[in-house]
Image: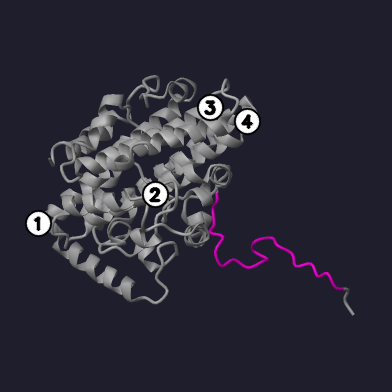
């Protein structure tokens, strides 16, 4: 197994950087592939990246050199669990980009960055998660169905011949939910599934750079959906997509050797794609639930004390696909995801964000206080 995806990291580091720009991967979505081939390549590569990250953390956990990292991870998770202010969507010390497995991350990150720039066929993308023996088939199927649904939403909003897009999204959502066992609900799952399960926080604390790389790809998907929905004409759409892809590149592989500006929190629909969330909350919840499930799978693969990772993942998939229990009130869910702020989740879809908006003074935010009462 270590040779399947782990070997890809080594082989792709140089060859992917030299791949001709004219050779683009196919997502299977003709509209995306034809009109925006570079975006298609990045969206396609994000699936391979997710699988490679899963593979990398499993390989790190199985290494004889990981004992110190495991001790540090356990200590960090214990400290986090005892913190009174601990909350998944808050900026805290545990978000430092140097995690307990920093040696493994430093070795893997360049190869993963290169993988994002490589071209992948549909066949490679379809089979890459299956190649990871740590991910049970039910999880692979649920994640794949979620990916296809996200691509379908983008196709709907890029299709100029489709006038009633709202009805089209409703139909796509109904079709997605038809397979009860392989779909997550169109309502927010309980935040406790993400932040209070037995192995919570292990992914983001253990591998902050690798989790950040996967969240950057999640940001790209949500930002693309947002701008595809709100663009008023072809020129605006093309310019916005070019801007989004440039922002994504800056996050994962900044020019001139600068530091990566990866998200330190899970990008969510209400924060990154508020317009799409407002018009299609059910579809938005599906994508957010899928994103949370990916993080939980990462938690289970990272945590050193999981007795049977495949069984634990299958159990969590069953809880995520259950549409009757462990659901969150929509207002409570909004409060949960908004606590992290826009900056930590990657910044707005339509522009960059150089500084966090959290705990800034009114003066720093260029806000003026205007009284309604005359001075005396």
Q: Nearer the viewer, mark 4 or mark 3?
A: 3
Answer with mark 4 or mark 3, whichever residue precedes in sequence: 3
Answer with mark 1 or mark 4, whichever residue precedes in sequence: 1
Answer with mark 1 or mark 2, whichever residue precedes in sequence: 1
Label 2 element class: helix
Residue corresponding to mark 1? 64
Answer with mark 3 or mark 1, whichever residue precedes in sequence: 1
Q: Residue at x 44, y 28 (%)?
A: 38
Residue corresponding to mark 4? 236
- Residue 164 picture location, percent across and down: 59, 28
Q: CA distance from mark 3 to mark 2?
A: 24 Å
Up/down of 102 relative to 111, above or below: below
Magenta stretch encompasses residue 370:
yes
Q: CA distance from mark 1 to mark 4?
A: 52 Å
Instruction: Tell me whether the residue at label 4 lies in contact with that at label 3, contact meaning CB atoms closer than 8 angstroms.
Output: no
Q: Residue furthest left?
A: 64
Residue corresponding to mark 3? 158
Label 3 element class: helix
Q: Which residues are magenta?
A: 353-373
Residue corresponding to mark 2? 289
């Amino acid at each position: 197994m270590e040779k399947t995806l782990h070997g890809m990291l080594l082989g792709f580091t140089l060859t992917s950087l030299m791949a001709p720009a004219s050779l683009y991967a196919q997502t299977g979505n003709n509209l995306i592939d034809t009109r925006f081939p570079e975006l298609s390549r990045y969206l396609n590569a994000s699936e391979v990246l997710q699988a490679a990250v899963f593979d990398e953390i499993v390989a790190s956990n199985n290494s004889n050199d990981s004992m110190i990292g495991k001790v540090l991870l356990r200590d960090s998770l214990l400290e986090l669990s005892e913190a009174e202010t601990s909350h998944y969507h808050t900026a805290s010390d545990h978000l430092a980009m140097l995690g307990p497995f920093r040696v493994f991350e430093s070795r893997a990150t360049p190869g993963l960055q290169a993988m994002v720039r490589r071209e992948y066929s549909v066949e490679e993308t379809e089979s890459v998660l299956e190649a990871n023996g740590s991910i049970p088939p039910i999880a692979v199927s649920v994640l794949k169905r979620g990916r296809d649904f996200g691509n379908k939403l983008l196709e709907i909003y890029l299709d100029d011949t489709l006038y009633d897009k709202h009805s089209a999204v409703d139909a796509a959502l109904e079709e997605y939910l038809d397979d009860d066992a392989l779909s997550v609900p169109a309502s927010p799952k309980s935040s406790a599934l993400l932040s209070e399960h037995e192995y919570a926080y292990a992914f983001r604390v253990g591998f902050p750079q690798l989790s950040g790389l996967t969240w950057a790809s999640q940001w790209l998907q949500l930002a693309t959906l947002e701008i595809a929905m709100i663009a008023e004409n072809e020129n605006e759409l093309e310019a916005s997509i070019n801007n989004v892809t440039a922002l994504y590149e800056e996050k994962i592989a900044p020019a001139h050797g600068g530091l990566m500006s990866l998200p330190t929190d899970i990008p969510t629909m209400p924060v990154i794609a508020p317009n799409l969330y407002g018009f299609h909350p059910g579809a938005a919840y599906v994508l957010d639930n899928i994103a949370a499930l990916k993080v939980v799978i990462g938690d289970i693969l990272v945590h050193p004390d999981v007795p049977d990772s495949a069984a634990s993942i299958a159990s969590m998939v069953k809880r995520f696909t259950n549409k009757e229990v462990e659901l969150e009130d929509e207002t409570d869910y909004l409060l949960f995801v908004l606590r992290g702020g826009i900056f930590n989740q990657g910044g707005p879809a339509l522009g960059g964000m150089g500084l966090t908006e959290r705990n800034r003074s009114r003066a720093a935010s260029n806000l003026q206080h205007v009284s309604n009462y005359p001075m005396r």
